[in-house]
Image (cartoon, grey):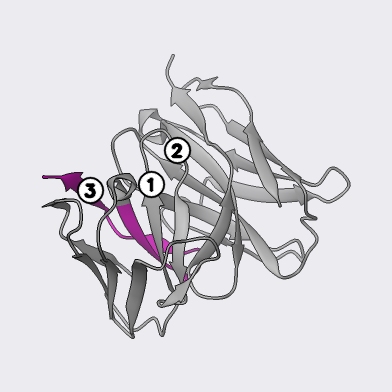
Amino acid sequence: QVQLQESGPGLVKPSQTLSLTCTVSGGSISNGSYYWSWIRQPAGKGLECIGRMYMSGSTNYNPSLERRVTMSGDTSKNQFSLKLTSVTAADTAVYYCARGADNGGSIDSWGQGTLVTVSS
Amino acid sequence: AIQMTQSPSSLSASIGDTVTITCRASQGIRNDLGWYQQKPGKAPKLLIYAASSLQSGVPSRFSGSGSGTDFTLTISSLHPEDFATYYCLQDYDFPGSFGQGTKLEIK
């Protein structure tokens, strides 16, 4: 079964860029049946979709974050990444990487999540 | 962007009860809706996809229904491990959006 693991700095300074990587094992990110997502959750709050991408190159970002977000993939390493620029304290959250399928609200595999704190 | 309005925001129930959680979409989303369970400190877990299809390995006491704008998650005969927070997710409109969540607490 596929497993996902987030990695990256746990502390980022305001105005800097948040960079996270998701390493996928047990399945290929090149599998066109799936898309790859980043989702975040501030402490004590709900879930927010940041973006999703297919390795074919198609990406969709949350309109509220679109100006600051870039997602990319590296099929040779079976990884995909998130960059979020110009961060503020409002970007402090647990960030999840996940795998979804185009069959109706189906995100079937999740990483354990990584806490990123924005603070000087 | 499509807004998902989930209700109630919290719910108290007893072991063995049947509970229903609803999500309403701001526009029609066909059946592009999933339901998730999240426990503290853990990633969400997929329960239902395509509005009414039970994810493999999920107990049959979980069921979903609806299409278009109105959807429900029903949990029959609550077990102790069902007390958690539940979210709906639409992905008709990419990249998708979640409801605000329903915290199910033991009475």
Q: Is residue B89 magenta?
A: yes
Q: What element carries label 2?
A: loop
Q: Residues within 10 Å of mark 1 (few under 14, many from 20)?
A: some
**CB atoms of marks 1 and 3 within 8 Å:** no
Residue that appears at 41% across and 33% down: B41
In the image, residue A104 sits, relative to residue A17, either above or below, namely: below
Residue that appears at 47% across and 43% down: B43
Asked if residue A25 can be seen in this view, the reply is: yes
Towards the viewer: B63 or A62: B63
Amino acid at dot 1: Gln
Q: What element carries label 3?
A: strand
Q: Which chain carries label 3?
A: B
Numbered badge on residue B42:
2
Towards the viewer: B53 or A12: B53
Left or right of residue B99: residue A104: right
Please give the residue where the numbered disc 3 appears in the rendered image: B103
